[in-house]
Image: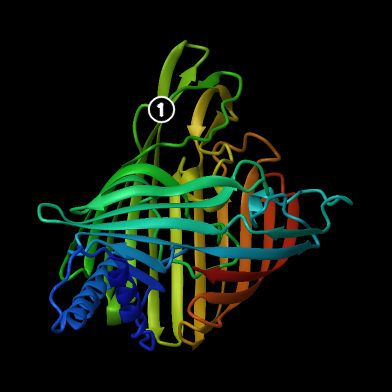
């Protein structure tokens, strides 16, 4: 068995000159016993090389590109018949950043967290952070009845308090026949609508949040047209005031989308998304439970105009959808008491827009990107509190350089601003550098 494993590793390594994906280590289980002494070893090597190529193709076909998506694994273990293959990978990510002329009170650059009053304590801040390092496993199973089955689990170290390096489960799902069950990035998020950033959260108008879900997706027209519908665990963040109380939610969020892709390898796409919400709370005055309807729509996409230049965008509008706008997540602005009648509760209208571009000096090796993003909460019957968030802006510019397929260096500048309902403003700046090594 051991000889077979070593032969299969060597067989894959022999193709390392190819620009296509090749794992660092490939191991295939082999039956005990010989094949005879005439050509047996050569047949074994050839068989395992074919098996390795089949497994690599399985991982490529089930890979997913986009914001913060993991690369294909560097270590793959497979059964001899390739019915089960397990990939293990991850990366070490070190970010060093310096905030100046305003320091964000968050490990990530979140305009919502920009201080409104400058003091001696929030002028500058230096951070060194490796909590965004990742570990993941991906299993691909060939099932006669179900087709390809993908089971994926990944984690980082961003649980608990900042810089505590507490392990944190990001994703844990199984996918088959178009269904996805488990924890994954919300269906409302278009993973290909923004370029990569050093900042872990990305533009404040984006919506890279995770949810526990049951999702169905269907691709037609040779994968040019894709549709998806999901039931997701709701997360409600509202301001209850004196007359309302939080209770457990009763109805899942329902995000959905339609996407059309075109061009070489479907590199360009446009996408229309929507989300429906029914948020429950208790009216302490009447003693009855009540609900508020939230909804949101989004247009997003990526336009690969040529190998050198790509545009990205997303725009969102809705009411009571803070989990689906990055800057407003956890802000307490899904709903607030009506300023004109505090016995009533109302959802808050909000919108967000992001536009960015990437210039590829050497495609997939050396590139620049930058963009502008804004999120805003509109007044409804006035505003509930003068210190309430009204608008946040996020401007970024970065450069990435891949020294090797596994080693990346990057630098980034961020500028953000926050404005409250009463007009008070705050600003912050951040310079960051990043070193990342995939394994």
**From the image, which quarter does the N terminus lie in?**
bottom left
In the image, 153 versus 100, the foreground residue is: 153
Q: Residue at x 45, y 60 (%)?
A: 315
* Residue beneath the point at 17% across and 70% down: 34
* The quadrant where residue 258 appears: bottom left
Q: Is residue 89 above or below residue 163?
A: below
Please indicate whether residue 205 sits to the left or right of residue 84 in the image. Answer: right
Q: Quadrant of residue 73?
A: bottom left
Q: Is residue 377 visible?
A: no
* Residue located farthest toward the left when viewing the structure as drawn: 145
Q: Count the marks: how many?
A: 1
Q: Is residue 243 above or below residue 252?
A: above
Q: Say whether residue 88 is left or right of residue 362.
A: left
Extreme residue in the right direction: 120
Tag 1 residue: 249
Q: Is residue 184 visible?
A: yes
x, y percentage for residue 420?
Answer: 68, 47
Q: Position of residue 393 (x, y in %)?
A: 62, 60
Drawn side of residue 285 relative to residue 162, left or right: left
**Looking at this view, is 141 or 332 the one in front?**
141
Q: Is residue 351 above or below residue 5?
A: above
- Residue 405: horizontal and vertical position, in percent? 48, 79
Mark 1: give few (<14), some (14-19) or many (20+) Cα within 10 Å.
Answer: some
Estimate the x, y position of residue 121 in percent, counting from the top left: 86, 50
Asked whether 83 or 177 is in front, the reply is: 83
Q: Secondary structure at mark 1?
A: loop
Corner quadrant of residue 15: bottom left
Q: Is residue 93 above or below residue 407?
A: above
Q: Is 372 on the left or on the right of 127, as rendered?
A: left
């Amino acid at each position: 068995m051991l000889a077979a494993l070593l032969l299969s590793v060597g067989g894959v390594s022999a193709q390392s000159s190819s620009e296509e994906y090749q794992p660092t280590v490939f191991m295939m289980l082999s039956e005990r016993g010989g094949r005879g002494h005439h050509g047996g070893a050569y047949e074994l090597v050839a068989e395992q090389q074919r098996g390795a190529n089949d497994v690599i193709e399985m991982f490529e076909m089930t890979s997913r590109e986009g914001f913060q998506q993991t690369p294909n694994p560097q270590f793959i273990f497979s059964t001899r018949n390739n019915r089960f293959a397990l990939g293990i990978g991850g990366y070490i990510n070190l970010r060093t950043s310096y905030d100046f002329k305003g320091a964000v009170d968050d490990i990530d650059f979140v305009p919502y967290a920009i201080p409104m009053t400058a003091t001696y304590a929030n002028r500058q801040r230096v951070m060194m952070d490796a909590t965004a390092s990742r570990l993941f496993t991906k299993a691909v199973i060939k099932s006669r009845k179900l087709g390809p089955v993908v089971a994926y689990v990944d984690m980082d170290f961003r649980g608990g308090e900042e810089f505590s390096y507490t392990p944190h489960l990001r994703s844990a799902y199984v996918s088959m026949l178009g269904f996805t069950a488990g924890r994954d990035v919300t269906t409302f998020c278009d993973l290909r609508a923004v370029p990569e950033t050093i900042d872990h959260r990305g533009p404040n108008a984006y919506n890279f949040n995770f949810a526990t879900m049951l999702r169905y997706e269907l691709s037609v027209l040779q994968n040019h047209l894709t549709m998806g519908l999901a039931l997701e665990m709701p997360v409600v963040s509202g301001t209850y005031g004196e007359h309302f109380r939080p209770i457990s939610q009763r109805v899942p969020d329902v995000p959905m989308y339609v996407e059309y892709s075109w061009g070489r390898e479907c590199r360009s796409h446009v996408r229309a998304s929507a989300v429906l919400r029914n948020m429950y709370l208790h009216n302490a005055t009447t003693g009855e439970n009540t609900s508020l309807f939230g909804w949101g729509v989004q247009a997003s996409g990526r336009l690969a105009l040529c190998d050198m230049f790509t545009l990205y965008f997303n725009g969102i509008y809705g009411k009571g959808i803070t989990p689906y706008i990055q800057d407003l997540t956890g802000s307490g602005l899904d709903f607030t008491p009506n300023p004109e009648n505090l016995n009533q509760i109302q959802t808050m209208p909000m919108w967000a827009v992001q536009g960015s571009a990437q210039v590829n000096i050497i495609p997939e090796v050396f590139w620049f990107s930058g963009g502008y993003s804004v999120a805003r909460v509109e007044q409804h019957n006035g505003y509930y509190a003068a210190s309430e968030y009204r608008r946040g802006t996020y401007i970024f510019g970065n450069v990435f350089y891949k020294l090797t397929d596994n080693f990346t260096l990057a630098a980034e500048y961020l500028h953000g601003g926050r404005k409250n309902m009463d007009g008070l403003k705050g600003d912050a700046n951040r310079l960051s550098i990043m070193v990342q090594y995939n394994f």
